[in-house]
Image (tube, helix red, strand yellow):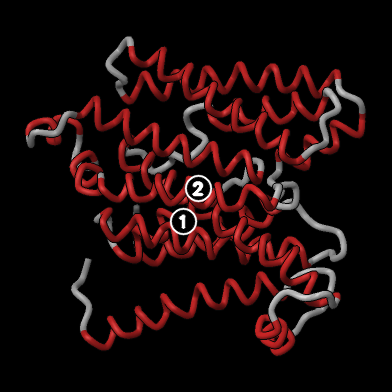
Amino acid sequence: MRRPTDRTGLLWIIGLLLVPLGAIAMSLSAGSMDMSWAQLFHLLQQGPGSSVGQAVLWKIRIPRTLLAGLVGAALSLSGVTFQAVLRNPLADPYLLGVSGGAALGAVAALTIGINSALLVSLAAFGGALTALAIVYLVARAHTCSSHTLILSGVMVGSVAAALLLFLLWRAPTEATRQAIFWLAGNLSLADPGWLGWGWLWVLICFILLWSQAVNLDLLTQGEETAADLGLAVGRTRLILFALAGALTACAVALAGLVGFVGLVVPHICRLLWGPAHRLLLPLAALFGACFLMVADAIARSLYAPAEMPVGVVTALLGAPFFLLLLRRRGGL
């Protein structure tokens, strides 16, 4: 990474402040009820109250913005970790069968008639952790090598996908519709009461991951090099996979399967600021949060009052921007 001059450093700092503010403002003002930025600022100054505008802002849009930020940050951190440890640019947060386990848990809950957002999220969270546990038990027999972890994850994901299709085939039409909407990524189903716990979970995982930044840098040099430099590769890899899996499980439980964030945002941040994880991890979390806030705002605005699955928007926004950046910068 080229050393920035004072002027470019100042521009980066200003940009890093303006991007989150712009994403938050866009997320809070988007939706079926028109709200200009001036009205938004006025309502924020007023605080919570009984008017329609205050209720919409403080009870619906602020929790939704916080949820989008939480899910985007969690998926980006998970993607950074998987891509570094596996040294695979195509690795994403759903690699270890977490998505399949979570989807199976949520769809099983929906098809037996459970409509509570809290119970569906709990079922998804339980399914994700169960998938992680199975992958770990299988991979442990081979000291948790990268290849064994990936193959175990693929197999667990395949079994979960088969069971998921069976459940959808047996389910009534309404339950199938709800399940498909959840599978495409949906930020409207999460229980606001989970936000505080979710942010605490993500914050703890982020701090633990950041403490492993040097180890992530070593692993990107190759397992043999990392071992020669004194790193306990098997144990470190297991810790990192567990943290990344825990972040993914939290994100999937709250918002379903939101694709592309964990794949594209780490690459964009790596292309812009280099591969050092001490800097890459917080920037990926910040831009992952901003990216999903903007994508969710678009999903809520395009066909308001109807709402598109946010996973559709993340794919349509992320892929072209990533290809453009890749063409200009020349490689991963």
- With respect to residue 246, does 133 lie above or below? above
Image spot of residue 56 (x, y percent) = 79, 70
Q: Quadrant of the N terminus?
A: bottom left
Which labelled disc corresponds to residue 265? 1
Q: Which residue is mark 2?
A: 75
Which residue is at the front of the view, 268 or 107? 107
- Three-letter code for the amino acid on which mark 1 is drawn: Val
Q: Earlier in the sequence, mark 1 or mark 2?
A: 2
Q: Secondary structure at mark 1?
A: helix
Residue 244 position by quadrant: top left
Image spot of residue 323 (x, y percent) = 49, 59
Residue 166 position by quadrant: top right
What is the CA distance from the residue labelled 1 to the residue labelled 2? Answer: 9 Å
- With respect to residue 222, does 145 lie above or below? above
Image spot of residue 287 (x, y percent) = 47, 63
For the image, the number of numbered tags is: 2
Direction top: furthest residue:
141
Question: Quick check: can you spot residue 263?
Answer: no
- With respect to residue 15, does 144 lie above or below? above
Q: Are marks 1 and 2 in contact (CB under 8 Å)?
A: yes
Image spot of residue 158 (x, y percent) = 59, 20
Numbered disc in front, either 1 or 2: 2
Direction right: furthest residue:
173
Q: Name the residue located 29 percent from the left edge and 31 percent from the top edge.
A: 237
